């Protein structure tokens, strides 16, 4: 059977649907210009689990759970579930950690970078330029034979681990819901104010997440791949989906009166442009070396890719480091050690890029 | 004559890079690419077509696929 979603119009529809749903989620309660942000939402999950104690960003985000499980349902339904693992997992973990640190210096993943743009946040331009620069550096490594080695087919249960962890988070959330006015309910932490306290209703967010996970798995939607394929091969297939996301999010924002152009005072954003650029450059390079944007890593995890699951865990742990060590930015600007972390992260990524070449067979 | 590229188990975009390298070399008319995911299958086919090649056949091969790419 022909896969419609893998066609040009398929990927454009998927980008459009994600753009519209992201803007709607914001209307339904998610933070400003953060209808869907994979990095921010994984950071909130890390907070809800107490892996960091930044009180304003603690909430188990059902969208993330939905992405993984929705992708898994699609993969099983279309016989694309392929349990596989063993391609440099520790390197993928480290890349996940630094991808998260870079994203939290900018304050968003590539999805949020374009959602910020679609909401009128001019600072996002510097983030997107940094993202492109980081991916461009990554393509230089790819051209010079950088690779992570081969995966191996494994037991189906290996591929179930991240979907099961996500299911576990969902159950925890249902068993230990937020108690009005309390920051902790036995197990989970919940923000009382700030972005973590802003969220769409649980089941709506979960359904949207499941739907996006499903169609994103079918379409292979990847924001990093969009820029990488353009730079590396001049291919615009994935890019059309990425552009469609911006256009439809922008139009939905206009319709919902959520478009507010400017640089200062944008929701959950800062105006230190060099570090908007630098943070996203680090994230872009890490995504390029790992082979997918954070959203794509979630969908791959749902398809049975155990290495992508390790990248996801790296990002969640990275969020812990970012908030415990003062690396993450806030609307006031970069954290006390954010700049040092970006420089260290770039050095680590360059080391990985230079030292892991050839040896594919 | 045909050349076989084994891109099984490699992450994105390695299978496409290997296929394009082989197409550029231009030594054989037929290139057979082994991949193990549907994403790689679609990406390799799309990349080959963008270079003016035709994908003549896609056969199941174990858990993955064999793509037959014709340069002519």
Image (cartoon, rainbow, N blue to C red):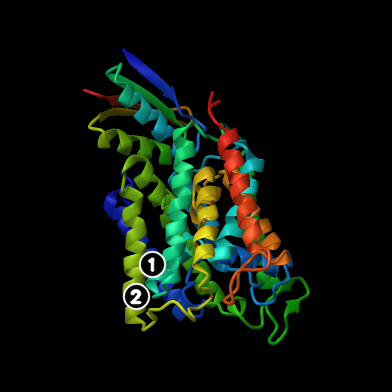
Q: Position of residue A310 (x, y in %)?
A: 63, 47
Nearer to the camera, B63 or B47: B47
Question: Residue visible at 31% across and 57% down?
Answer: A12
Report the number of numbered marks.
2
Q: In the orientation shown, which residue stands out farthest toward the right? A: A186
Question: Residue visible at 38% across and 51% down?
Answer: A226
Q: Quick one: SS at disc 1?
A: helix
Q: Quick one: SS at disc 2?
A: helix
Quadrant of the rendered structure where residue B45 is?
Answer: top left
Quadrant of the rendered structure where residue A177 is?
Answer: bottom right
Q: Does label 1 lie on the same chain as label 2?
A: yes
Quadrant of the rendered structure where residue A250 is?
Answer: bottom left
Q: Position of residue A42 (x, y in %)?
A: 60, 63
Q: Quadrant of the N terminus of chain A?
A: top left
Q: Is residue A222 left or right of residue A294?
A: left
Nearer to the camera, A240 or A340: A340
Query: Which of the chains bears the disc numbered 1?
Result: A
Nearer to the camera, A25 or A146: A146
Q: Quadrant of the C terminus of chain A?
A: top right
Q: In the orientation shown, which residue stands out farthest toward the front? A: A274
Disc 1 designates what residue? Answer: A19
Q: Position of residue B39 (x, y in %)?
A: 42, 41
Q: Is residue A147 above or below residue A34?
A: above
Q: From mark 2 to mark 1, how far is it between C-alphas? A: 8 Å
Disc 2 designates what residue? Answer: A252
Q: Is residue A287 left or right of residue A3?
A: right
**Residue A211 makes an appearance in the image:** no
């Amino acid at each position: 059977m022909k896969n419609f979603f893998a066609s040009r119009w398929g990927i454009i529809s998927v980008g459009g649907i994600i753009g519209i749903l992201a803007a709607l989620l914001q209307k339904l309660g998610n933070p400003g210009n953060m209808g869907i942000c994979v990095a921010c939402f994984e950071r909130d999950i890390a907070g809800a689990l107490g892996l960091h104690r930044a009180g304003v960003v603690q909430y188990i985000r059902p969208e993330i759970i939905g992405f993984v499980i929705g992708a898994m349902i699609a993969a099983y339904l279309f016989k694309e579930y392929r349990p596989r693992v063993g391609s440099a997992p520790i390197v993928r973990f480290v890349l996940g950690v630094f991808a998260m640190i870079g994203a939290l210096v900018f304050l968003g993943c590539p999805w949020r970078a374009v959602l910020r743009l679609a909401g009128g946040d001019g600072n996002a331009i510097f983030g997107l330029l940094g993202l492109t620069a980081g991916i461009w550096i990554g393509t230089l490594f790819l051209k010079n034979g950088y690779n992570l080695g081969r995966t191996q087919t494994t037991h189906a249960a290996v591929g179930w681990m991240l979907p099961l962890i996500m299911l576990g988070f969902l159950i925890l959330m249902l068993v230990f819901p937020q108690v009005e006015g309390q920051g902790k309910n036995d197990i989970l932490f919940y923000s009382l104010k700030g972005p973590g306290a802003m969220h769409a209703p649980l089941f709506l967010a979960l359904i949207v997440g499941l739907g996006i996970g499903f169609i994103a798995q079918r379409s292979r939607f990847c924001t990093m791949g969009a820029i990488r394929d353009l730079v590396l091969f001049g291919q615009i297939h994935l890019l059309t989906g990425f552009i469609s996301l911006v256009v439809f999010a922008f139009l939905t924002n206009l319709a919902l009166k959520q478009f507010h152009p400017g640089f200062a005072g944008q929701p959950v954003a800062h105006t230190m442009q060099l570090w908007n650029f630098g943070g996203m450059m680090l994230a872009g390079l890490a995504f390029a070396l790992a082979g997918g944007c954070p959203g794509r890593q979630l969908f791959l995890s749902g398809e049975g890719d155990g290495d992508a699951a390790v990248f996801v865990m790296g990002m969640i742990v990275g969020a812990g480091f970012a908030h415990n060590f003062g690396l993450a930015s806030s609307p006031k600007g970069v954290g006390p050690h954010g700049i040092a972390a970006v420089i260290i992260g770039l050095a680590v990524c360059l080391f990985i890029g230079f030292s892991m070449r050839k040896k594919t067979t | 004559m045909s050349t076989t590229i084994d891109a099984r188990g490699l992450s994105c975009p390695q299978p496409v890079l290997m296929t394009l390298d082989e197409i550029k070399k231009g030594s054989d008319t037929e290139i057979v690419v082994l991949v193990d995911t549907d994403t790689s299958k679609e990406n390799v086919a799309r990349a080959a077509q963008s270079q003016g090649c035709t994908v003549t056949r896609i056969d199941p091969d174990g858990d993955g696929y064999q793509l037959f790419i014709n340069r002519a």
